[in-house]
Amino acid sequence: MNQDIEKILLSEEDIAGKVRELGETLAAEYKDKNPLVICVLKGAVIFMADLIRHMSIPCEMDFMAVSSYGSGTESSGMVKILKDLDTSVENRHVLVVEDIMDSGLTLSRLVELLRHREAASVKVVTLLNKPERRKVDISPDYKGYDVPDEFVVGYGLDYAEHYRNLPYIGVLKPEVYTK
Ligand code: 5GP
Ligand code: MG
Ligand code: MG
């Protein structure tokens, strides 16, 4: 285990089983819909890569990078598009893939934007969900796990751009934040 990790919350095996299950559910749901699967960079990239390999249906992928900006460290609800889609979502069935839903502000803005662009449908799949932290009335259409209000890293999730490559999801030791 990485020396900065205090405990493992979800092992590589846990995640693999859950992602397979989600992929199979989504494949059944989106059969014959040629969905546009959108990865929210960068955190969702590993989840997305694993997920679509369990969706054995025709689908397309695209990428978006957004940042919620404001004065503090908390999500402000203003979403700035850092990288927009290459594909038009008009009349497409869109599936947004996220790493973690926290306050929900980022995804609620993103969903609003995609609806405004006249997608045929917009749904969200998130690997992790922190329901306790929600600030807006949004819940994922599909989710892997509810997690407690702890800062997690690994499997795409970072702290200061590190730890995305850990194959499991874990909680950082407190001294990592304070050093
Ligand atoms: P929100 O739902 O608050 O708008 O923002 C969600 C985003 O905040 C996630 O996509 C992720 O980038 C970041 N985030 C929220 N909670 C965590 C966490 O526990 N660990 C990490 N690494 N990022 C988090
Ligand atoms: Mg994210
Ligand atoms: Mg991050």
Image: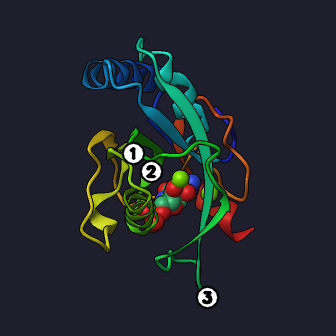
Instruction: Label 3, secondary structure: give it.
Output: loop
Residue 100: which disc? Answer: 2
Mark 2 or mark 3, which has the lower sequence index?
3
Percent position (x, y) of residue 57? 41, 14
- Tell me if mark 2 has few (under 14), some (14-19) or many (20+) residues whose alpha carbon lies within 10 angstroms of its own: many
- Tell me if mark 3 has few (under 14), some (14-19) or many (20+) residues whose alpha carbon lies within 10 angstroms of its own: few
Q: Is residue 163 above or below residue 56?
A: below
Instruction: Label 2, secondary structure: give it.
Output: strand
Residue type at mark 2 is: Ile
Quarter of the image where the C terminus is located: bottom right
Q: Residue at x 63, y 32 (%)?
A: 1
Which residue occupies the foreground of this view, 94 or 101? 94
Residue type at mark 3 is: Ser
Residue type at mark 1 is: Leu
Disc 1 C-beta below 8 A from ligand 1: yes
Mark 2 or mark 1, which has the lower sequence index?
2
Instruction: Label 1, secondary structure: give it.
Output: strand
Residue that carries the numbered disc 1 in the rendered image = 128
Disc 2 C-beta below 8 A from ligand 1: yes
Is residue 3 shown left or right of residue 152? right
Residue that carries the numbered disc 3 in the rendered image = 71
Percent position (x, y) of residue 59? 47, 23
Mark 1 or mark 3, which has the lower sequence index?
3
Q: Tell me the CA gap for discs 2 and 3.
A: 22 Å
Q: Residue at x 60, y 37 (%)?
A: 45
Asked if labels 1 and 2 touch by Cβ distance under 8 angstroms, the answer is yes
Which residue occupies the foreground of this view, 126 or 171? 126
Q: Could one spot residue 155 in this view of the protein? A: no
- Tell me if mark 1 has few (under 14), some (14-19) or many (20+) residues whose alpha carbon lies within 10 angstroms of its own: many
Q: Residue at x 68, y 35 (%)?
A: 165
Asked if labels 3 and 2 touch by Cβ distance under 8 angstroms, the answer is no
Asked if labels 3 and 1 touch by Cβ distance under 8 angstroms, the answer is no
